Amino acid sequence: MEKTPRIIRLSGRIDATTAPGMEEELSSGIEEGTRAMIIDLEAVEYMSSAGLRVLLSALKKMRSVGGEMRLSSLQPHVREVFEMTGFSRLFTICADIGDAQSSF
Amino acid sequence: MKGGEWEEVPGLDGVAIYSYIRKVDIASSNSYIVSFPDAIVVIDPGGLPDQAATLLHEIELQRIRKDRPVLIFLTHVHLDHCLSLLTDPGFRNLSRHLVLVQDCGACSLECGDRKATIADLVELEYEKTDVDVHLFCGHDADSEIMVRVTPEGEPVLTEPNQVFQKIIPSQIIRLENGEEIEVYHTPGHSPDSVCIRVGEVLFCGDLIFATAPGIAGLTGWDRKQLDTTIERVLSLLSGEEITVCLPGHGRPMDTESTVRALLAIQKEAQGLDGIHEINPEWARKTALFGRSLMSEVDRLFTIIAGRLVYVSHVLEELEERGEAARMEELIDSGLVDELLSDFNRFSSDLQAGNRQEIHLALKAGQIAAKLKRLFRKDLLATVLDLSLLRRIERHLEDYNVTFRGFRPLDRIECTDITISMGEIVVNAVRPPYHDEDIILAPDDVSFARALALRIAWVNLFEKMKFEYSPGLSLPLVLMDNERFEDTVMFILEKLSVAGVPCINISSGENRDGVTMSLKGVATSWGPLDTQAELFARNSIELSGGRFKHRSSGDEFCIELTYPVGETGSMNNADAGEIS
């Protein structure tokens, strides 16, 4: 099992088209034994509800195996979606990768 | 009729038809080839190279079986029906053919009229093209023209011969063996529109699309002529032996469904007086409006769908699985997501130069109509706050109205802007539920609903302080209050999520009317991005006001100004400061 956090960098638009690929990436990370994960959203310009679902599903999986997850570097649009949907209450959101790493 | 293969023409022995049927779009029309023993008739060659190649191949095969002249008819000269005729080398070099077009359409092709052919709108080029036969030229209506073939195989025409009077202006093109092609002048969609009858088949061009958004209002569109045409075609369908109608776009229709469609169009057309002309300027403005509006619709749908996912998750954690499942069923968020992604791809294509603005305007119209069907406000209102839902409903309707060629509806009334703003400030932080609703819930279902409502409410203004100083004794202003409320909520949401810690709102009178000012200190990425500012500006203008955004260093001031209403009418804002 990994002890140092694994950083997964996502980019572009996360919507109905790209969310399945992201889900696969996150799931395989957890299945491979990652128990501390940072999802870097610095390069994500847009996130739809499909993206939110995938992140929530990954969070549930991570918690079910006793792991932890952080989100970092949210851009204004993505941050707005998190604030307005209530998702900011579910996730630990860090300003940048450094903050996220030191939070474990 | 199936299309894509040769079939018998109903009502005519030994005459076959090949239908090239496309899905409905403005890139190209359907095309039809009718094989008579003495001639091959093409109706609307369409606008795409692949389609032209298929048609030319079928014509060639027919000519191998028996060499005959080709008569090319256009139901009208919009480029989606005739671009291939004007630009495709195969059609331009086709041997022994005649082109037959209604007179004013023919003149438009001959003089290169870009408005009449909608070339200006779809941004396509074509060369001026001569037309062999101007149909309905001068007094030629209700006449007959004979097509004879010379020993060299060249088609020649007789002078029109006045022979009959019908309920609808028509001309008969008679072939040597006596078979006829009857053309009816059916203006409305465009001045040169015609329907064409062969046996029991009526080729009706774009008549059944004449009231479609983005189509009604095209240059040359005429509501009164359309009304007359529909009356006449309805008479034709009731009196003549027509069993199949082949439209310019989409699937074949039987007579019964064509009659139903025409009656619906006739009714719809009655509400289209005063429609905006669909021209390049309209396309540019509508596409811009569509992009801005769809961006906000996208944001709101994402919030709604995301909030339902959030509520469902929390309810599951609380083991309220029934209510959690209900949340997931309130909207098909997967389909909403797909539609919005589809629009985004389209919009990116436009920016990359692969699409024209008219296409984006039409696409936004399609997507808005689909989203409207998916949006069940009554169901969503059981859990989500009404402001969000009302805004989505309004935006979709606004686009629909704009796309239809009208200005979105507003209800400009004398309003006390200071009271209106006071209500916005109070309601922004007031939860839409009462604590007692959970305590007093009579049963499990009511309890779960009350719980869901509570979880679904997100106080967006937890971290933003409001300071509201209404001006005293200000006159009433002319504005659409609901639009004002919705736009101010939009601006406040944007300021809050941008991390603005405190917003100072004040109002005062000036020579332009009454101005409501929202002042604050911006964070690193500014209070409103370009898209949000454009949206706010449009929305404030639709509510009857003017939007101004000033910045100085980190400080910003958003001013919303409305004209004064009735002289002497004063508001009753003597309330003190609300913090």
Image (cartoon, grey):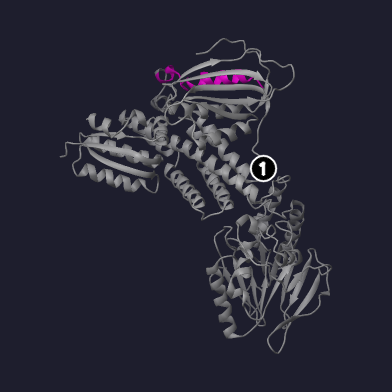
Q: Which residue is mark 1?
A: B406
Corner quadrant of residue A29: top left
In the picture as drawn, the residue positioned furthest to the left comes out as: A1
Q: Relative to the observer, which residue lies in front, B22 or B328?
A: B22
Determine the residue positioned at 52% across, 27% down. B551
* Dominant secondary structure (helix, strand or loop) of the stretch shown in magenta: helix
- Subunit ID for the residue under disc 1: B
Determine the residue positioned at 48% across, 36% down. B300
Q: Relative to the observer, which residue lies in front, B244 or B55?
A: B55
Classify residue B44 as left or right of residue B501: right
The mark tally for this picture is: 1
Classify residue B341 as left or right of residue B235: left
Residue B229 at x, y = what percent?
75, 58
The vertical placement of B354 against B391, above or below, is: below
Corner quadrant of residue B312: top left
Residue B403 at x, y = what percent?
62, 45
Can residue A99 be found in the magenta stretch? no
Q: Amino acid at mark 1?
A: Phe
In the picture as drawn, the residue positioned furthest to the front comes out as: B553
User: Element at badge 1?
Assistant: loop
Tag 1: Cα neighbours inside 10 Å, few (<14), some, or many (≥20)?
some
Determine the residue positioned at 38% across, 42% down. A50
Q: Quadrant of the image for the N terminus of chain B?
A: bottom right
Q: Which residues are magenta?
A: B415-438
Classify residue A76 as left or right of residue A24: right
Residue B348 at x, y = what percent?
48, 49
The vertical placement of B550 against B31, above or below, is: above
Residue B285 at x, y = what percent?
61, 44
The vertical placement of B11 against A101, above or below, is: below
Q: Relative to the observer, which residue lies in front, B33 or B253?
A: B33
